[in-house]
Image (cartoon, rainbow, N blue to C red):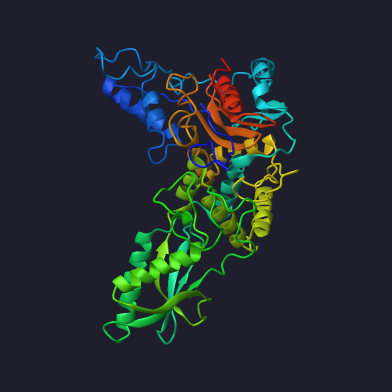
Amino acid sequence: MRPSDPWGGPKILTKKRNGAYTWQVIAGSATLGLVVAAGAVLAAGPWDNGQRKAERALAAAGDRTGGAHHGRPTPDGPRPAPSAPAVLPALGTTTHDAPQDPAALRDTLAPLIGDPGLGDKVAASVIDTATGKQLYGQGATIPMTPASTIKIATATAALSVLGPDHRIATTAALSPDSRTVTLVGGGDPTLSRAALRAMAADTADALREDDRDARPSVRLTYDISRYTGPVLHPISPNENIAPVTALMVNEGRLNDTDRGPAKRTEDPAGDAARTFAAALKKAGVEVTGEPREARAADEARTVATHRSAPLDALVERTLTNSDNDIAEALARQTAIAKGEKASFAGARRAVTNELKKLKVPVAGAHFADGSGLDRADRVTPALLTALLARAADPDRPGLRPVLTGLPIAGFSGTLGGRYAPDAAGTGLIRAKTGTLLGVNSLAGTVVDRQGRLLAFAFLASGSLHATEAEPALDALATALAGTGG
């Protein structure tokens, strides 16, 4: 398998080319007016970690367009940036209460959804996130293979049960006799070599505090009992995912990349332990023998801890880059929090039950994995749009990273290369991509001309080439940005 999503979304194919608020501003100067306008744009968010800088710049520009005047271009200089409409309408001019015309929306989408490039089966859902009203549906309740768009469900469940501030801990435990150090995996696939070096230094300090020799000697074991069940994903071995274990360094990658396909180690936990052993030796600790797998003793005390980035950051990385390894980790962390076994089966039960608590339509859904690599996965377009609406709910700020992590058309992640700089949807669409052989999907959000935040999900199967299906999906999303006027 070789992905055609640029950051590891699974593919085999090759080339692919709210309620509204009224703002009343009495400005004593033009400067004050600009300050207030900029503040309103920021509040309209969600803005996140710089991912919406391009959108913020466009929004602050008001009614001006981006390519009107850029000075005199030099013969060998870059061509002017394309003009683009404002992302948000002028303050006080949004028409959230204007009636939406479902018939007009059907007329707009019908010829596009019939594009033969999408294959022989297409299901769709479009809703107004503020009201939850379905504006368009075609087979919206039919379970389909979602590919990587299932990550929206995985991420939502994890945030719902754990919260955006949750961090995954990796620890080092010292036996009561100070003779054995156990590296205990917590399930953080982003654990780095630098983190292990820091843990090794803390471990060495703890050993010296025990009034032992200047150069202490220990045995090293590693504990991966936090996860249970099969380690290999059904498609493994595969460059899109490492063996799913509770202990690994940099997603088991055998190069320095942090996204996309890469050769993976067959023994992520063992490699992590050997990396930790080398770090202990550099910190002045003699490690006898080879690291071996064993549980930490019940009486062992923690002498070093590393915590992952907060869950909201992991969710954003998962969705932006279509990261399969983090997605599987999120599913298992959900299982642990829900009292299920941290396995593929346990994660399936945990995610399903947590989504039921969110009162979204899970009928027909089947979460065989957390990443979407498994063809046994099933979700409906209605489920995906309902999840996006929950993430947009002002009363559920903890779910907002599901929206802020979505790739931006033409700018970031798996949509970074899908929209040309001058394409109508560039910068306006945020969506999760999904692709397997013969399966193509796109689910995300877009603001229409009335200022409504729409959630959409388009799931297609039976396509012959991703190079035909992806432009057809992109055209559907782009069409939504132009509706509602």
Residue 470, given in percent of the width and then of the height, sits at 58, 28
Q: From the viewer's perspective, is 483 left or right of 30?
A: right
Residue 130, given in percent of the width and then of the height, sits at 59, 31
Residue 58, picture quadrant: top left
Q: In the rendered view, would you say 337 is above or below 220?
A: above
Q: Quadrant of the C terminus?
A: top right
Identify which residue is drawn at 67% across, 16% down: 111
The number of numbered discs placed on residues in the rendered structure image is 0
Q: In the rendered view, would you say 212 is above or below 9?
A: below
The one of 33 and 364 positioned closer to us in this rendering: 364
Residue 431, given in percent of the width and then of the height, sits at 54, 33
Q: From the viewer's perspective, is 351 left or right of 246?
A: right
Q: In the rendered view, would you say 197 is above or below 450?
A: below
The one of 54 and 6 positioned closer to us in this rendering: 6
Residue 19 is at least partly visible in this image? no
Q: From the viewer's perspective, is 286 left or right of 416?
A: left
The one of 35 and 426 positioned closer to us in this rendering: 426
Q: Quadrant of the N terminus?
A: top right
Identify which residue is drawn at 50% across, 47% down: 315
Residue 236 is at least partly visible in this image? yes
The one of 314 and 451 positioned closer to us in this rendering: 314
Residue 30, picture quadrant: top left
